[in-house]
Amino acid sequence: MTEIRRLGRQIGVEITGVDVKRLDDAGFTPIYRAWLDGNVAVVRDQHLEIEDFLRYSRRFGVVVPHPSKMTRHPAHPEITLLGVNKFGPDGALNVAIYRRGGEGWHTDGAYDAEPFKATQLYALAIPSTGGDTLFASMYAAYDALPDRLKQRLEGRLGAFTYGGRRQATALLNEEDRAWTPVFHPIVRTHPETRRKALYFDPGKILRIEGLDAAESDALIDELTLRMIQPDGEYRHQWRVGDIVIWDNRCSYHKAAADYPPEEDRIHWRVSIKERA
Ligand SMILES: O=C(O)CCC(=O)C(=O)O
Ligand SMILES: [Fe+2]
C-alpha cells in the first residue's frame, strides 16, 4: 500500500510502501501528483540497479547528461556520480567533488535555455553523521516578497550561465567552460501548477536585464536574502535506498557538505528536462 505523508509545512512529501521497479501508470500517478504538490518527494527503501533508476527517472521527463563530464558514470553518461573520486591521486581531498552543491542555495540547470525540470538522486552510501540536503520552496519565497518587489520583478529576465558571476567551473573540462548566457523570467509561472515562484540562483545569475550593473547587483543581493522562508524549508537526512526528486522550477536546494570526508557519501544522480 502506497502511503504519502507531508514532511515540511510547505515542502516535502515522503512516499513509502512502493517498489518503483514494479510501478505501473496507475501506481505512478499519485506519486507524480504528490511530487508536484510537495516539490520534493522522498521514496524510501528502494533496491535499484542503474537501469531501474533510469527507467523510473524517465517517467518524470527526458533524462539528459550533465555538463560535468568528469563526474559522469563511465558506462552511463546520463548518470552523474556524487561523492566518487573524492580524493586525488596525491591523496588530497577534491573540494569541488566533496562540496558539490554546498556553496549556496540554488536551482539546477538554470544555465540551459531548456532548464532542468527535476533532479533525482538515489543514495548508495551515507556517512555516519552530516551530509544532509536542504530544500526550500520558491513559491514561499515569491509569496513572501513585498509588493514593491513583486511589481519590480514582474516581466524581468535574468541572464544565467553555468558559473555565474564567480565563473565557478571546477567540475567542467577546460573545453566546456565558455557559456553563452540564457534568459529566464525571475518570476516564473510553473507550467503544471500555474503558481508563481521566485526563479533565482545567485550562483548562476549574471545580471537582471534592464537594470544598470549596480542596481542589478543590489537587487540580486536583496533577493538572495529573501530566497529562504522558515516555513518553506525541509532538511533531508539520507538513508541508503532513498530516492529523492526535487522540482527545479519551484524549489531551491543545497548540500550541507559537512560530513567526515574520509567517509563515503555516494549517490547516482540524473538531470531531467521537460523536453530534449
Ligand atoms: O549532494 C547533495 O546533497 C545535492 C547536490 C546538488 O546540489 C545536486 O546534486 O544538484
Ligand atoms: Fe544542485
Image: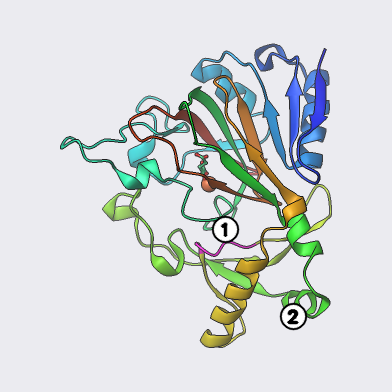
Q: Position of residue 214 (x, y in %)?
A: 53, 87
* Residue 129 inside the magenta-drawn segment: no
Q: Left or right of 143: which side holds 176?
A: left
Q: Which one is nearer the viewer's eye here, 110 or 168?
A: 168
Give the residue at x 39% y 27%: 264
Alpha-carbon span between mark 2 and mark 1? 23 Å
The residue identified by callout 1 is 113
Q: Position of residue 85 (x, y in %)?
A: 30, 33
Give the residue at x 64% y 44%: 275
The residue identified by callout 2 is 152
Amino acid, disc 2: Arg
Provide the residue span drawn in magenta: 200-204
* Residue 203 inside the magenta-drawn segment: yes
Give the residue at x 34% y 58%: 177
Above or below 179: residue 246: above
Question: Closer to the N terminus: mark 2 or mark 1?
Answer: 1
